[in-house]
Image (tube, rainbow, N blue to C red):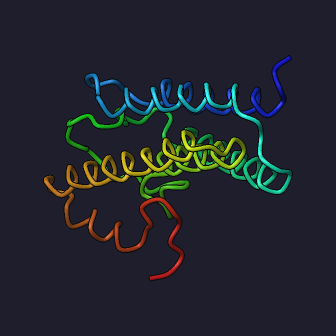
Amino acid sequence: MIPFETILVWTALFRELWVAGRTFTRVQSSLLALLLVCNFAIMAYEARYTEPSGLWLRSAGFVLLILALSLLEWAAFCVRGKFFSYIGNPDPPKFIFISGPYARIRHPFYSSYILTLVAVAMIFPNRVTIAVAVFNFSLLWYAAEFEEQKFAATEMAGSYRTYIARTGRFLPRFSR
């Protein structure tokens, strides 16, 4: 029988990918998107073959997982019907979206992915899950830089700099 923790993690990872798949528009294939999907698959595999952590760490991981999925759903609900492209696509942005979680976090989807991967590493701690979480944080940091550079090359650059000054990249900014 598959443990409850494993089923929960598989469900969360699948939900992250499914929501992203139906929310964003594919402009072209992206190596970043492929890497993210592969890393989610590695985490799912590790969840099947690793013993869960102790009660406190596992509980904290579940709380993070709930936070991650809540942020994901909120962000997806807010952007539904807008043109947002897959991670790593070079298409030029056409607007700055500042509603919902975007009012405080520039990349709430990436934040959700990071929280999910950290949660999985907490629930099933081992070298692989921790390495995948660290690697993905680096990958998503690069993707965020890439997205922000796309804005800098448009006529919205000044407005985007103002947006950057009042929002956090992955964590909410409440001051300034």
Q: Nearer the viewer, residue 52 or 4?
A: 52
Q: Residue at x 76, y 36 (%)?
A: 51
Where does the image place residue 102, in percent across and percent down from the top left? Answer: 48, 56
Where does the image place residue 126, in percent across and percent down from the top left? Answer: 62, 43
- Report which quarter residue 27 is drawn in: top left
- Report which quarter residue 98 is drawn in: bottom left
Q: Residue at x 76, y 26 (%)?
A: 7
Q: Where is the C terminus found, in terms of image quarters?
A: bottom left
Q: Nearer the viewer, residue 50 or 39?
A: 50
Residue extending furthest toward the top: 1
Q: Would you say 71 lies left or right of 5 here?
A: left
Residue extending furthest toward the bottom: 176
Q: Is residue 93 above or below residue 89?
A: below
Q: Residue at x 47, y 50 (%)?
A: 134
Q: Would you say 62 lies left or right of 95 here?
A: right
Where does the image place residue 82, in percent across and percent down from the top left? Answer: 41, 36
Residue extending furthest toward the front: 127
Q: Count numbered badges in the picture.
A: 0
Q: Residue at x 29, y 29 (%)?
A: 31
- Report which quarter residue 161 is drawn in: bottom left
Q: Nearer the viewer, residue 110 or 2?
A: 2
Q: Where is the N terminus found, in terms of image quarters?
A: top right
Where does the image place residue 50, in percent across and percent down from the top left? Answer: 70, 33
